[in-house]
Image: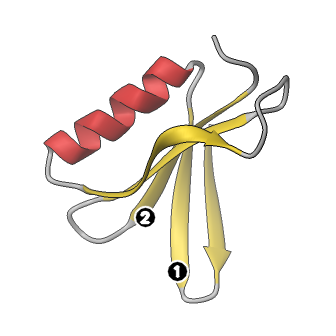
Amino acid sequence: MIGYVTLGSDNMTAIAADSRAKVDAIHAKALELGGTCEGPPGVRGEEGPQAFYGAYFRDLDGNKLCAFRIGPAD
């Protein structure tokens, strides 16, 4: 699933992952390919059944992206 959010003057595309390891891998690959970190992988808020685990980065064109997983640690 891919979501598209518009807030203020910036846009962000979000990529849902089915595990925290995949969030980590997407973020690492983005940086490896020359992207910039906008927030390392980690839980935002409290851990639990609806925990938000996300990582933020920008691609080479400056687009902001987020890879995320909602749910408990896997």
Q: Secondary structure at mark 2?
A: strand
Question: Residue 35 falls in which quadrant of the image?
Answer: bottom left
Q: Amino acid at mark 2?
A: Lys
Is tag 1's residue or tag 2's residue first in the polypeptide sequence?
A: 1
In the image, taking residue 21 as reference, residue 74 lies left or right, namely right
Is residue 31 rendered to the left or right of residue 37?
A: left
Q: Residue furthest front?
A: 46
For the N terminus, the image quarter is top right
The reply, left or right, for residue 54 in relation to residue 29 is: right
**Which residue does the image show at 66% across and 79% down from the upper left?**
7
**Residue beneath the point at 82% across and 25% down:** 48
The amino acid type of the residue labelled 1 equals Asp
Which residue matches tag 2? Answer: 64
- Evaluate if marks 1 and 2 touch, with contact meaning CB atoms under 8 Å apart: yes
Task: Indicate left or right for 32 with 49 as reference.
Answer: left
Q: Residue furthest top?
A: 74
Query: Relative to residue 62, is residue 31 depicted above or below?
Result: above
How far, Cα to Cα, is label 1 from label 2? 8 Å
Please report the residue visible at 56 percent of the width from the left and 28 percent of the height from the top.
Answer: 17
| 52 shown above or below 6 | above
Q: Which residue is the site of mark 1?
A: 10
